Image (cartoon, grey):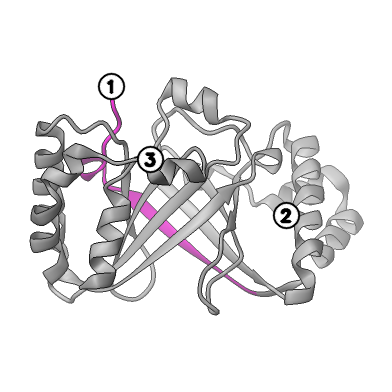
Amino acid sequence: MKHFRYLLSIFLLVGLLPNHSQARQLENMEFIRVILEFDIKEGHAKKFEDHLLAWKECYLSNGGQIEWSVFYRMNGEGDNYVFTYIKPNWAAFDEKDEAAGECFNLAELMVSPDVKTSRTHMAKFMPEVSKAPSTGDISVIWATFFKVKPSGYAHFLENINTLSDHIAEVEGDKRVYWYQYQGGGESYPHFFVTQAFSDFASLDQINGVWKNLEEGLEKKKKDELYQQFFEPVTSIYSHIYRRLNEHSHVND
């Protein structure tokens, strides 16, 4: 319960998806994305979602101003939900939210019975290798996570820069959003990258990045980049997430 109370206290401070003015402010910033991940007890998914809606109603009725998104993981074991929001910098973690305080007990009492395990992640956005933060509708996220060798950290950072430059050269723009984890457990990944889509149908319309690079740079260069990119990687996995619009909130 202490760990869950801590997670909620972090979650109730400040919020997620940037509106148009926020996106402009964050475009060249290494903002911090906070990710709260919850594994739900079997048979409790609907209750969990209902409880989140009740908390959202309480928070907004008390004049809350934060923004956040809720995602449901489409693949993997069990029911997994992700709450994500952004902080412009570390100093912003000192801020308080009175509306959240009014609903804290409600959130704890309603949500905690449904949660099996929970994790908190903090990751810094990497603007120099990423697309500008989106202001459009996002319904689907494809996220890929990388764990690298202790001796390969700097190498992988160089590889991200190199690959990003080649993708921009071939496709005309950077394709994805890169993040670098800030601390974490021994088994946690070190980096993750996301690609955002307006709907699932959009997934049928895209080419894989390596296919595009082969067409734009020829096979020999693509194979060289592929080998170089994955050399320091020790593990890689991906998840697809669907945004729950009713449970998320963006200010008008």
Which portion, as a residue range, is magenta? 235-252
Q: Provide the secondary structure element on which disc 1 rests.
A: loop
Residue at mark 1: 252
Of 21 and 141, nearer the camera is 21
The residue positioned 50% from the left and 32% from the top of the image is 134
Q: Provide the secondary structure element on which disc 2 rests.
A: helix
**Quadrant hosting residue 146:** bottom right
The residue positioned 55% from the left and 65% from the top of the image is 183
Label 3, residues with CA under 10 Å away: few <14, some 14-19, many ≥20: many
Kindly tell me whether residue 150 is visible in this rendering.
yes
Q: Amino acid at mark 3?
A: Leu
Residue at mark 3: 16
Is residue 172 rendered magenta in the image?
no
For residue 169, above or below residue 11: above
Mark 1 and mark 2: span between their CA atoms?
39 Å
Quadrant (top left, top right, bottom left, bottom right) of the N terminus = bottom left
Q: Amino acid at mark 2?
A: Trp
Q: Is residue 42 left or right of residue 96?
A: left
The percent position of residue 201, horizontal first and vertical second, equals 42, 43
Mark 1 and mark 3: span between their CA atoms?
13 Å
The percent position of residue 111, horizontal first and vertical second, equals 14, 62
Residue at mark 2: 210
